[in-house]
Image (tube, grey):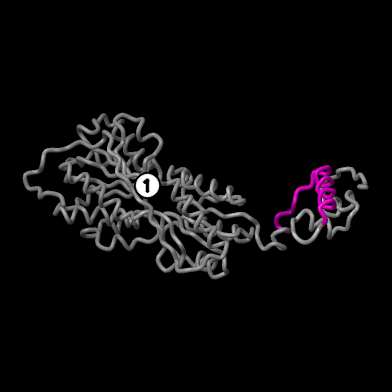
Amino acid sequence: MSRTVEPRGIATVPDVARAAGVSTATAARALGGYGSVRESTRERVQAAAEQLGYRPNSLARSMITGSTSTLGVVMSDIENPFFRRSLRGIADTARAEGFEVLLANTDEQLDKEETAVRLMTERRVDGLVVCPADGGDRSHISDVIAAGIPVVLLDRRVAGVKADTVGIDNRKAARTATEYLLGRGHRDIAIVTGGTPEMLERMLRPDMRGIERLSATTVGARAAGFRDAMAAAGVPIRRDLISSGGYRREDAETETARLLSLPNPPTAVFAFDAMQSLGAFHAISRAGVRCPDDISLLGFDDAEWADVVSPGLTVMAQPTYEIGVAACRLLLSRIEGSGGAVAHRRLPTELIERGSVAVRPPHPDAEPAR
């Protein structure tokens, strides 16, 4: 017969043991779900725990089981619709498998990423999904992998880091999008990207030489795809139409306004993510420029607003939720002990035509886009 113990403060395992009339070791086994405990005893212990409002100490349990059933997710910009949607894919998949998610946001800053990774590992997460910021020393990720904690990189690869990655073929997707604009008669094509002054300096090299070697972010790969398509079509890249002003919507708005004010403005803008697309759309609307009659706009990522604005935004869509699901499944398989070579999984993209890209008369010197 169990003894009644008045709840007082935070209930502990010894409190539950006294209430159930069993030893502390027996109560711990019954509450932790390990070892041998008679079913009648287990029921008595659980009833006492419920009466006392006992909550398990996950850290203590992890020292016994070797698992906290938590995953760390380090995102670079949670305001960006791509990362929000992929996070939902990660969280849904994790919870379906009995895992919870700890989230950190880095604002694309490497020092914040380093701090987040360190705190996640100190909290003994079973694995990490990281969307890495650009540049700098990446030893904090390599050290985690060397310590035996599985890591999956989301959306971006990092040179020199042997980690699984999940995303798309950004270079190929950007080339396809640029070829779409070229095929509709556009030659003066601007790109509006996120990034840093250092990235812009790299992009302004003759013919964007070496831009594909930009580490971590997708900017380099997408710029390389743009360059590839322009070169194949024999269309020169105008340096004044290259923009890399920052990651916020306001940055893209400012840069697009600059492009529109040029003596010879672009006929089309290719925005490299949903935040850049939204900023460009705002700038075009505020300038009183007609889209697509005066200027066409093509975006990367199919944000929620893209099909409700007028005109609807033509986009290169990537399966953002599915990318999160695939990243989580890959991480869970590594946690469960799946070995094998480092995996780089690429999901398909789709160009969705709406109303924001117009066909322009062919330039007299233009060669057919290939």
| Residue that extends furthest to the front in the rendered view of this protein | 39
Image quarter for residue 166?
bottom left
Q: Which residue appears at 24% of the width and 58% of the height?
A: 208
Give the amino acid at mark 1: Gln
Q: Which residues are magenta?
A: 38-60
Say left or right for 28 vs 359: right
Image quarter for residue 220?
bottom left
Q: Nearer the viewer, residue 308 or 115?
A: 308
Q: Nearer the viewer, residue 281 or 175?
A: 175
Q: Position of residue 71 (x, y in %)?
A: 58, 55
Which structural element holds mark 1?
A: loop
Q: Position of residue 139 (x, y in %)?
A: 49, 67
Q: What type of secondary structure mainly makes up the magenta span? A: helix
Say left or right for 202 vs 113: left
Q: Which residue appears at 51% of the width and 54% of the height?
A: 328
| Residue that extends furthest to the left in the rendered view of this protein | 364
Q: Position of residue 348 (x, y in %)?
A: 35, 51
Q: Position of residue 151 (x, y in %)?
A: 51, 61
Q: How many marks?
A: 1
349 drawn magenta: no
Say left or right for 304 vs 121: left
Residue position for label 1:
318
Q: Which residue appears at 22% of the width and 41% of the height?
A: 268
Judge whether 363 appears above or below 198 on screen.
above
Q: Say few, some or many: other residues with alpha carbon within 10 Å of mark 1 (under 14 / 14 to 19 / 20 or more).
A: many
| Residue that extends furthest to the bottom in the rendered view of this protein | 146
Q: Which residue appears at 51% of the width and 49% of the height?
A: 90
